Image (cartoon, coloured by chain):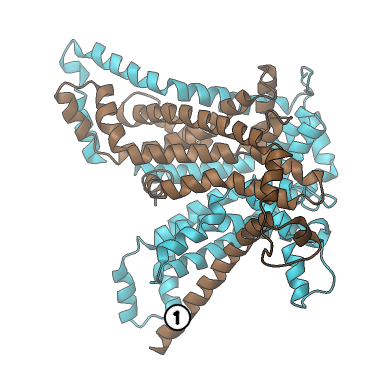
Amino acid sequence: MRETLANRALTYGLLGLFVLMVAVPLFWMVTTALKPNKDLYEDFSYFPRRPTLEHFVRVIQRDELLTNIRNSLAVALTTTAVTVVVSALAAFSIVRYRYRGREWIGRVILFKYLLPSAMLFVPLYAIVTSLGLGNTLKSLMLTYLSFTVPFCTWMLMGYFRSIPPELEEHAMVDGCSKIGAMVRILLPLSAPGLVASAIFSFTLAWNEFLLALVFTVDQSTMTVPIKLSMMVVGDQYIWGQLMAGAILASIPIAILYFIGQRFVVQGLAAGAVKG
Amino acid sequence: MAMRQRSLAVAVPVPETVPRRPRRVDREQLGGMAMLLPTVLILVGLVLYPFVYSIWLSFSDKAVGSAGRFVGLANFRYVIAWPQFSAALVNTVVFTVCAVAIKLVLGMVVALVLNQQIRGRNFFRAFLLLPWVMPAFVVYLVWRWLYDPLSGLINYALIDLGLLQTPIAFLSERSTAMASVIVAHSWRAFPFFAISFLAGMQTIAQELYDAAQVDGASRWQQFRHVTLPGLYQIIGVVLLLSTIWTANAFEPVYLLTGGGPSDATMVYTLLAYVMGMVNLRLGEAAAVSTLFLPLLVGLVLAVTILLHKKATA
């Protein structure tokens, strides 16, 4: 009895410690964005005494963050739309058709999913500039496919494998074409996997840093991560605006995470990190 | 698996038996290959070609705006002789080993705690996952602010608690910069370890623990002889994956220290970036990446084989 009590105490003690460890930086991000500059740099306080939205206003009006948010959204949404279609077709082809080289392509896809873009940014930069796509959002939409498509294809392959092909075969016996069976049977059944892959490719594209840093150079094409990282070096007293920007940049991801948590867990369970 | 193959054999009749069938099967195969075409184009155009091109670049004197000529091993000789390169090599290894070790231990303890019967477990699991869910650049900007020597929370709180007399410039002193980057990165990435281990722990049968308890095993012995062996495979995969990601991390260093002070946190990805994008010498930048290639490809192949075996098993 005493041992279990000690165990309980240890468990909840550690849990409290971890919650604190995660909560403090998050708390600091949010409260920094809400404190006036005076409270940040002169009259220090742990809690916001005079909460204000001035940093949000300033980061939107003076730093024109909305332009960057629009850029990020355009890139992430385009990448996601293309990725989901392309990966679903590829995964369907690899899992449900039999032809030579199929296994091999599955392996290449996994290899790429693991190969970091740090390895490829130099040649991609040379390619993008030689295509005349330097400093455009198109360069990002194109190159982001190099990691979203392998990731989502790999995940959907796992998902499609988990759905028994008999269901499609029955539909085909009833006169459905193979593609028809995919559209009417497989895709609806794997909706959670498709949602998860859309969430993942959006998140990957929204968060991408290195390629965006290398390919885009001015305000009209910068995505949010690059814009915020440029603001750091500009001004000493920028932290209120930066944290406001950081919160705005986290909102789409937070929304997706809370809407999609169920799908993501299911999708992951079936695919990428198959336990 | 066996079932699937049998049923596929039913769906796709053996071609030789009926003379008209081969064409149909061919057409079906073609349809399948056509669906794969966009992905193949992406893999060839955006992965394979750049990959090969990168290796060619590392043997050329290509700069931005000029066509490159073959220059043999000149880039490699130049890069290796450069003092920054050895700094980057050492720093990359130190950063990777320390960060992965911290994430492993922290992730394991968090998973063990979350695997207990605690009230509100789903909430805590989701909450502790937040650092991993947040955009990485946001995390590192927040940490840069936390570390700020003039108005950062860490310095202020330490002084407030009487643990410190004068503020420390965590990110711009040689003695603390690397450790600070490692801490920030570990904070961001430990949830991946925790959540993977937790998923693994939940597949371990309760009967094993019951049996161990009947045999009088202590908590530690249960962990050592039931939990840990049940997690070996997951630990292996997670360690390899994380090693690859950590060794190639760019954002923590770029956003926190920019490689400074005096290269104390210069890692190879940042060196390649500085070479290519700041000094505009693409050949040397590619050479930096190429030098790290054998290590990376070895790691990636190891995970590829491990995961592929598991997914198709």
For the C terminus of chain B, the image quarter is: top left
Chain coloured brown here:
A
Left or right of residue B241, residue B269 in this image: right
On the image, the x and y values in percent for residue B233 come to 44, 55
On the image, the x and y values in percent for residue B61 come to 79, 24
Furthest residue in direction left, as rendered: A174
**Kind of residue at disc 1:** Asn
Left or right of residue A186, residue A109 in this image: right
Q: Residues within 10 Å of mark 1 (few under 14, many from 20)?
A: some
Q: Decide if residue B99 is in sight here.
A: no
User: Between residues B106 and B70, which one lies in front from this camera angle?
Assistant: B106
Image-quadrant location for residue A34: bottom right
Q: Is residue A144 above or below residue B25?
A: below
On the image, the x and y values in percent for residue A189 come to 28, 37
Helix, strand or loop at mark 1: helix
Residue at left offset 20%, top offset 14%: B21
Residue at left offset 75%, top offset 57%: B178
User: Between residues A151 and B58, which one lies in front from this camera angle?
Assistant: A151
Q: Chain of mark 1?
A: A
Left or right of residue A241, residue B234 in this image: left
Total marks drawn? 1
Q: Is residue A242 above or below residue A154?
A: below
User: Between residues B209 and B111, which one lies in front from this camera angle?
Assistant: B111
Colour in which chain B is shown? cyan
Q: Decide if residue B197 is in sight here.
A: yes
Image-quadrant location for residue A123: top right
Please name the residue that numbered disc 1 is placed on. A7
For the N terminus of chain B, the image quarter is: top left
Residue at left offset 31%, top offset 69%: B206
On the image, the x and y values in percent for residue A104 come to 43, 30
